[in-house]
């Protein structure tokens, strides 16, 4: 790809994509709503604390340098709002967009994690469907857009990462389960990660309601 975004640009772009699907009535986003979305504590990894100046600067880069976002205004509101324009660059399907969005917001994930997280943005039948979508993104003629990372020690599933920030740095890792000839069951960390994913999905609706209320309140300040 002829593009390389920094982590904050990725967060801003991911939030614009997410909110278009999750809260369409409040999209495009005001600057305040976008800042709140970037700084959410759920469905984000890592959690960030971005200020207005930083988000505005990243919006400028996405708009002027990468042509991945635009500012929109209307006669009904004098407040500037922002939206992504990913479809102007690539013809991603809704399922592909949902997978990329979750990789933008949470970083590298296994197909199982992606299925749990991205299903809130687009229905995904099972892990096999997610793997098919990842392969499509990996084999796109104008891509690849994702990459398969080496298996982490003690893990059964390999993670996938997006390539919108260039090739991720990968530390040399030893696949201990294969070296010893024994398969391993889910580790405590994997079980906790699954539980955290389920809790995060339940909290998403609450966070979106809070964001909607904050934007509504700001409109009258």
Image (spheres, helix red, strand yellow):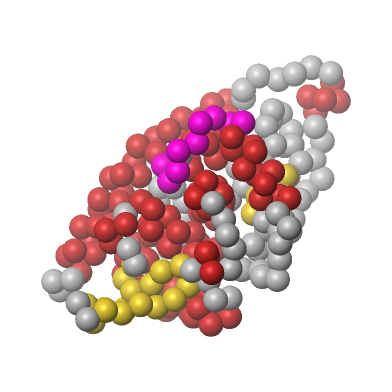
Identify whether 91 is placed above or below 96. Answer: below
x, y (%) of residue 56? 43, 78
Q: In the drawing, does residue 29 fall left or right of residue 185? A: left
Given the current orientation, which residue lies at the most extreme top position? Answer: 182
Identify whether 129 is placed above or below 73. Answer: above
Identify whether 55 is placed above or below 11. Answer: below
Note whether residue 81 is visible.
yes
- What residue sits 19% from the left and 77% below the top? 76
Total labels: the figure holds 0
Q: In the drawing, does residue 54 fall left or right of residue 211? A: right
Residue 31: quadrant of the picture: bottom left
x, y (%) of residue 13? 49, 64
Residue 90: quadrant of the picture: bottom right
Residue 24: quadrant of the picture: bottom left
- What residue sits 31% from the left and 71% below the top? 30
* Prevalent SS, magenta region: loop
Image quadrant occupied by the C terminus? bottom left
Highlighted magenta segment, given as a residue range: 120-128
x, y (%) of residue 205? 31, 44
**Residue 65 drawn in magenta:** no
Image quadrant occupied by the N terminus? bottom right
Q: In the drawing, does residue 40 fall left or right of residue 111? A: left
Note whether residue 168 is visible.
no
x, y (%) of residue 58? 50, 75
């Amino acid at each position: 790809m002829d593009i390389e975004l920094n982590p904050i640009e990725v967060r801003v772009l991911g939030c614009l994509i997410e909110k278009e699907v999750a809260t369409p009535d409040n999209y495009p986003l005001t600057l305040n709503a976008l800042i709140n979305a970037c700084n959410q504590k759920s469905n984000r990894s890592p959690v960030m604390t971005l200020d207005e100046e930083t988000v505005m600067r990243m919006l400028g880069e996405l708009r002027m340098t990468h042509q991945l976002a635009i500012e929109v205004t209307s006669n009904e509101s004098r407040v500037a709002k922002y939206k992504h324009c990913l479809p102007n660059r690539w013809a991603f399907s809704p399922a592909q967009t949902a997978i990329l969005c979750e990789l933008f917001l949470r970083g590298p994930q296994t197909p199982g994690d992606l299925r749990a997280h991205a299903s809130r943005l687009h229905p995904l039948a099972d892990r096999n469907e997610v793997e098919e979508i990842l392969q499509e993104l990996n084999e796109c003629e104008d891509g690849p857009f994702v990459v398969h990372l080496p298996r982490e020690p003690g893990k059964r599933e390999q993670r996938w990462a997006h390539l919108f920030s260039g090739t991720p740095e990968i530390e040399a890792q030893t696949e201990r389960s294969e070296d010893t000839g024994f398969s391993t069951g889910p580790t405590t960390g994997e079980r906790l990660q699954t539980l955290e994913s389920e809790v995060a999905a339940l909290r998403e609706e609450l966070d979106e309601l809070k964001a909607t209320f904050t934007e509504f309140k700001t409109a009258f300040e």
